[in-house]
Amino acid sequence: IAVPLCPGGRCWWRWAFLLCGWVLGSELTFELPDNAKQCFYEDIIIGTKCTLEFQVVTGGHYDVDCRLEDPDGTTLYKEMKKQYDSFTFTAGKNGTYKFCFSNEFSTFTHKTVYFDFQVGDDPPLFPNENRVTALTQMESACVSIHEALKSVIDYQTHFRLREAQGRSRAEDLNTRVAFWSIGEALILLVVSISQVVLLRSFFSDKKTTMTRVGS
């Protein structure tokens, strides 16, 4: 697995990407600045089934450009301004595959993007799980529990993403309501002061006119 280096050594999450990559895939949440593009690389063997799933968690209209290329640079998948998507393919060549997320269309909004890149199938729970003879009752129960736990982990991940996205939307809405309330308060204050000044000007003009007539 190869990832682009970054100055200052502050891209600690890329080390996490490297560590996760040893387990038949990568799962990562990262920030994508405005006018930026981030690419990731994965070495895949021919005939391996792979799945790329991504979702924009926060930022702007919750959309991002995604592109997947094979070792020869041929585009296997390309989508523009997608909030979330999933793409499954079978590697047709040996080599390094590249998938990129782009926020170059955004001028001032950065995004938080989650992706899960699965390469191949999980290794069997037991070394002799694919044997001809049937599994024991204990082994079958372990396999069932293992599959159920994987489903639970997937559901938890998606629910966390939805919770984070909902919280971001709520915070953004709260900020807009706060600014709108401040704006309304300022407008009411300006209108009130204007009305008082206008009324005082009416009485001031009348008093001046009456004084001149009496003299």
Image (tube, rainbow, N blue to C red):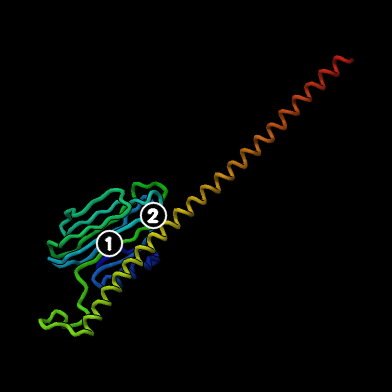
Kind of residue at badge 1: Phe
Residue picked out by circle 2: 111
Q: Which quadrant would the N terminus be assigned to in this image?
A: bottom left
Q: Choose top left, top right, bottom left or bottom right for residue 201.
A: top right
Residue 122 image label? none
Q: Describe residue 184's horizontal placement relative to residue 207 as left or right.
A: left
Looking at this rendering, what residue extends furthest in the front direction? 137
SS at mark 2 in the image = strand
- Picture residue at 25% right of the left edge, 50% below the top: 79
For marks 2 and 1 on the same chain, the one whose residue lies earlier in the sequence: 1
Total of numbered circles in the picture? Answer: 2
| Element type at mark 1 | strand
Q: Residues within 10 Å of mark 1 (few under 14, many from 20)?
A: some
Looking at the rendering, which quadrant does residue 96 occupy? Answer: bottom left
Q: Nearer the viewer, residue 104 or 205?
A: 205
Residue under the point 11% across and 83% down: 133
Q: Nearer the viewer, mark 2 or mark 1?
A: 2
Q: Residue at x 76, y 29 (%)?
A: 200
- Residue depicted at 24% across the width and 81% down the height: 141
Residue 107 rendering spot, x and y as whole percentages: 39, 46
Task: Report how far apart the C-alphas of labels 2 and 1 lie in the structure.
Answer: 17 Å
Q: Which residue is mark 1?
A: 40
